[in-house]
Amino acid sequence: MIYKATTPAIPIPDTDLFSFLLESNEFNQSKDLNLPLNIEGESGKSLSWNYIRQQSCLLATGWKQNVGLTKGDTVAIFAPNQLDHAILYLSLLGAQCTISPGNPAYTEAEFEHQITNCHASALVTVAGLLPVLLKITDKIGLPRSKIFLFGDKQVEGCRPYNSIKGTTEVSAPIQGSRRDDVAFICYSSGTTGLAKGVMLTHGNFIAQILQSVRVDPENEDNDDVILGFLPFYHIYGLTSLVFNAYYKVTPVIIMARYDLELLCQLVEKYKVTLASIVPPVAVHLAKAPVVTKYNLSSIRLIGCGAAPLSREHIETLAKRIPAKLVQGYGMTETTSGVISQGVEGGVAGSIGILSPNMECKIINAEGKEVGDDQEGEFLFRGPSIMKGYYNNDKANAETFTTDGWMRTGDVGKYDSESGEFFILDRIKELIKFKGFQVAPAELEAILTGLDIVADCCVVGLYDESQATEIPRAYVVVQPNVEANEKTAKLIDDYVTKNVTNYKKLRGGVKFVSAIPKSPSGKILRREVKEWLKEEQKQ
Ligand code: 4UU
């Protein structure tokens, strides 16, 4: 059975994201566009909607005329959340470039993978990351004249991106830009393997913005302030804090990184009303003693997504913060949320209802469609589904069915009693540490690079107290190697050295005599996960 959105369909205009965001709409017509819109939480520095618009239009001309970027050039960006992030994103869209944002905490190998995989013709970053990034760009021959910095200093021959501003504004609508052009290449491992470039079009983002307006009609109150610690390079922060907030003219309190006490201070200081969070943050807010020192009563709505949140955690949080908590479900490949509980809320533990224009199909292990109350893998179709993985026919063939449905690797059901969807399990390889993607295949490749490791399998172990999965490695050592604590530490240290912080083997290293495999040699992750279940029963 095919589930269709129960809310009215929304027409998606055939325009580009830059023009769409700058043209007048029901929100920007009724608000003062000279008021602070993007606010740096700690310093209080701010930029208005009008200033962001004007600077974006001048910079868009600069990217074309002074840097020589042309339609379809990709610009990689690695930086923690910046006050002027929206200007950078908008200006590049206005210059018809494709943006590839990545995690500033990546290791050298992770940066290199993204920069080379997306074929970046320019790079924007912060001065602190230059030493590692210049190693890569010098190696691959990306000149320093194509490397730009946030801030206002020239470092190592790289200019502040602000210095390339043009003297005339690019004007919307942009000639020659179309809804189907690729706006972003974000990185996600999808259902299997290493991080892949997810091509998201201008139309994908426009659909996402319009869908989210419908899902949250209370936004029309016009006096919301949103908390902005989710990273702007990840689809959840990118959509909710950069584009949706700009479209709705909702002030964003920008934080460069997550810090619980600072978060509480900023909520109190700026009377934050909306908070987009992930499950481990929900647990901190519910349990950490420091939270009680602050007045968080301004928060009216908390949106939580990126990983499952248990009913117990929802209830504990509600005791402390009386705001409505709504869950949402989304992926990089679906341009953020596609199923969510509206402001009306939903059944505890559900992820809510389909966004407008979206269709969902649930299939069982044999690939047959199932009906109400039956478990299966979710597949989606609709205007916010990615164009595909960049330069990766194999992954596209595995992910899309011939009739255009996209597989998610997530298992759930449609509950006929409540009319809402539930997520129950994940059959893809992905591990989510505090909302961040950890690809088992990547950790396994690193582990097998160690000569004492004969074979291995990495799975996610659920840590209820932190509401997150943590990566655990099962390792088979070579015959001449002792499987003892010293070896485990050596393996753990090696992985830690080679990955960014959130991919560490926090679930430990366990030795086994063999990794279960199918006749074709594929790891049987289900069986490995059974070991975890047995261990957790003890
Ligand atoms: C159980 O995490 C994201 C996007 C999150 C998001 C965005 C907008 C959530 C709500 C919202 O409104 O993207 P990725 O690509 O990093 O990870 C996608 C995967 C999903 O396939 C699923 O396995 O993250 C998991 N996931 C969830 N799992 C996402 N949301 C949920 C959820 N419950 N609510």
Image (spheres, rainbow, N blue to C red):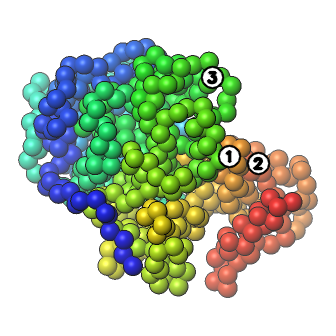
Indicate the secondary structure of the residue bearing disc 1. Answer: loop
Q: Which residue is mark 2?
A: 492
Alpha-carbon span between mark 3 and mark 1: 31 Å
Q: Nearer the viewer, residue 14 or 277?
A: 277
Residue kind at label 1, given as amino acid type: Lys
Q: Earlier in the sequence, mark 3 or mark 1?
A: 3
Q: Nearer the viewer, residue 70 or 511?
A: 511
Residue 64 at x, y percent in the picture: 17, 38
Residue 77 at x, y percent in the picture: 39, 39
Q: Residues within 10 Å of mark 1 (few under 14, many from 20)?
A: many
In the drawing, what numbered circle is on residue 8?
none
Q: Which quadrant of the view contains residue 512?
A: bottom right
Q: Residue at x 74, y 58 (%)?
A: 473
Residue kind at label 3, given as amino acid type: Thr
Q: Which quadrant of the view contains residue 314?
A: top right
Name, please, the residue furthest toward the front. Answer: 417
Q: Which residue is mark 1?
A: 504
Labels 3, 1: front one:
3
Please, is residue 498 above or below residue 36 in the view? below
Question: How many numbered badges does the structure rendering display?
Answer: 3
Q: Quadrant of the N terminus?
A: bottom left
Q: Which residue is mark 3?
A: 292
Q: Residue at x 15, y 42 (%)?
A: 19
Indicate the secondary structure of the residue bearing disc 3. Answer: helix
Residue kind at label 2, given as amino acid type: Asp
Q: Earlier in the sequence, mark 3 or mark 2?
A: 3
Can residue 77 be seen here? The reply is: no
